[in-house]
Image (cartoon, helix red, strand yellow):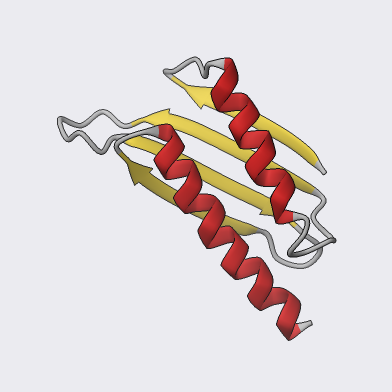
């Protein structure tokens, strides 16, 4: 699976990149036809503390899965997005 990481207004540190790759690699255990995964990290321009947005696009044959989560940290929003994507992949596999 190919993984791409794009950021807007933020530079991800190495442990965050490693965490992204590790989390996304686990998704293949739930659905083995994943072609590519794209992660978009963005700091929202708001005064709220929960302004770190992670958008996850999982490309699979048929329909792509798109999950967008905003939390207080990128790690937290990444975890939420991956968890939601995991549930959607399991559901898609059961329907196949």
- Image quadrant containing the C terminus: bottom right
| Spot occupied by residue 12 in the image (x, y as percentages of width and height) | 52, 19
Q: Residue furthest bottom?
A: 95
| Spot occupied by residue 10 in the image (x, y as percentages of width and height) | 44, 18
93 up-or-down from 47: above or below: below
| Left or right side of 78 for 35 | right
Taking the spot 72% from the left edge, 84% from the top edge, the residue there is 95
- Name the foreground residue: 6 vs 88: 88
| Left or right side of 50 for 91 | right
Taking the spot 77% from the left edge, 59% from the top edge, the residue there is 29
| Spot occupied by residue 76 in the image (x, y as percentages of width and height) | 41, 41
Q: Quadrant of residue 49?
A: top left
Q: Quadrant of residue 48?
A: top left
12 up-or-down from 37: above or below: above
| Spot occupied by residue 73 in the image (x, y as percentages of width and height) | 36, 33
Taking the spot 53% from the left edge, 57% from the top edge, the residue there is 83
Taking the spot 73% from the left edge, 36% from the top edge, the residue there is 3
């Amino acid at each position: 699976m190919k993984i791409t990481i794009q950021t807007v207004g933020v530079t991800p540190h190495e442990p965050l990149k490693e965490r992204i790759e590790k989390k996304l690699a686990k998704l293949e255990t739930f659905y083995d036809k994943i072609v590519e995964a794209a992660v978009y990290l963005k700091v929202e321009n708001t005064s709220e503390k929960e302004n770190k947005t992670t958008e996850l696009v999982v490309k699979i044959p048929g329909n792509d899965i798109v999950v967008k989560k905003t939390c207080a940290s990128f790690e937290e929003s990444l975890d939420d997005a991956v968890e939601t994507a995991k549930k959607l992949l399991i559901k898609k596999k059961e329907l196949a």
